[in-house]
Amino acid sequence: MSTAADGANGAVDNPANANQEPNALTNGNRVRTWSRLELTEIDAYDRLGYTFSTFKKWTILSVIFVVQCSMNFNAAVYGNAVDNMAEHFDISLQTARVGQAVFLIAYAFGCELWAPWSEEFGRRPILQLSLGLVNIWQLPCALAPNFATIVVGRMLGGLSSAGGSVTLGMVADMWEPDDQQYAVAFIVLSSVGGSVLGPVFGAFSQKYLSWRWIFWLQLLFGLATQFLHWIAVPETRATILLDREAKRRRRAGQTKIFGPNELKEKRISVSEVLTIWYRPFEMFFCEPIVLCLSLLSGFSDALIFTFLESYSPVFKQWNFGTIALGMTFVPLLIGYFIAYFSFFPVIRRHRAIRKKNPDALSPEARLWWLLYIAPLETIGLFGFAWTSLGPPHVHWIAPLLFSTLIAIANVRGFLWSPTKHVQYQLEWPSLILGFLAFIVTIPIYIFYWKGPEVRARSKFAQTLACDRKILGERRRRSVIESLPAGPKQNADKETSEA
């Protein structure tokens, strides 16, 4: 077995030398020996995102709020270019909307495709790469000589959008599981809010500028967002920070210390990538809780893009122009903020309970407030349906009020969008959506009351509970602190005692 001096002469500079050690201990694809010790979270907890100051955490999160807004802005603002693109390229409105659908579908897969890389190489470089690629793909769309170029550019833009797989991962980097609620709610607000900002600002571009400016606006927003992220957001991924701290300690003389990635034989394998990509889909089809709540979330997201299509025929009955139609999305934004702040008392109450007894609340307790606001989606859709009859039966404020109720329930995709809305009586598409909303809401109540039984039969739920317990035990256990201090460690200890 190598000594500390051996490590200083060879192993320090070449982590792969771990493979040459006798009696090596292997964990996954990491190789440890007694002369090469892994720096764990408990050994360097003060260097991780969990210990960032509150101001630093929320500064980072505010920039991530802008990042998430920009991604969803890109998804939604396209609708304001549809009419003018259809005229310019002499295509039907239905064909022009393909660019919207392609982006959304690609975006859904893009979120999953970026996930393993941010876990392995860090949040900061992956988000920078994602934002940079999204900005690049705006150029062929803005300069497109034909509609096919726009479809390809939109597809690549969707695939390049990292989305929640990275932004919500950063929340997990900086807050412990029981303290994440405020931060998660903030990121969810940015996601739904960005989708509404698209048609609001896009309306002005549609009225006063060429359709190409829809893509130039996305590029300008994206460049500003990427620059803001570059200057204001540091790395937060724990394994990356541990690697950096291990290198710093080796430079200070603690030659046995290595970060988790430095002890890997391979940085990331094809099988690991495929497993990370495959697991969400396996959970979707095999886990009832994941399936039902994903359908609810997807349905709620789909409503945003459905409204991009349905608002025009509904409010044109009251002679709303382009700008006025854009402003009809403001009540949705108001509803999102109402929902966001409505969760605060619930979060405070749950925190107070967990402070007294960490095990007092079951996972299903997080569904409690949804029991009351989820029905607002069905109520809002039925109300929107029967108030979309137009003048002289109803004032235009009525459907906007009901859309606010829908938005309140929406803070928690892509299923169906009635692009041929005007061919039917306007109330029927919203009524159908109302019935669907009722159906996808039912599982909330089932899981709230029967959640423990469902989790007991779920292999994933049991695995997650076991992994969380192991992680907690690992954080409490430090191999490094249990070793005799070397010359440098003794010197550091004496200095600190003095």
Image (cartoon, rainbow, N blue to C red):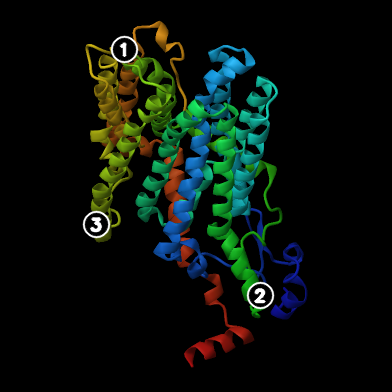
Mark 2 and mark 1: Cα distance apart in space: 69 Å
Residue type at the position of mark 1 = Glu
Residue 217 in the image: x percent, y percent? Answer: 55, 37
Report the residue at 41% width, 37% height from top.
192
- Residue bearing the label numbered 2: 250
| Mark 2 or mark 1, earlier in chain | 2
Choose between 255 and 59: the one closer to the eye. Answer: 59
Tag 3, which secondary structure? helix
Q: Are marks 2 and 3 in contact (CB under 8 Å)?
A: no
Residue type at the position of mark 3 = Ala
Q: Nearer the viewer, mark 2 or mark 1?
A: 1
Residue 485 in the image: x percent, y percent? Answer: 58, 83
Tell whether 451 sits left or right of 201. Answer: left
Tag 1, which secondary structure? helix
Residue 241 numbered mark, or none: none
Mark 2 and mark 3: Cα distance apart in space: 42 Å
**Quadrant of the snapshot with the N terminus:** bottom right
Mark 3 and mark 1: Cα distance apart in space: 45 Å
Question: Residue 6 occupies which quadrant of the picture?
Answer: bottom right
Residue 427 numbered mark, or none: 1
Residue 32 in the image: x percent, y percent? Answer: 65, 64
Choose between 18 and 197: the one closer to the eye. Answer: 197
Other residues around mark 2 within 10 Å, as few (<14) / some (14–19) / many (≥20): some
- Residue bearing the label numbered 3: 352
Tag 2, which secondary structure? helix
Choose between 262 and 233: the one closer to the eye. Answer: 233
Report the residue at 26% width, 53% height from top.
348
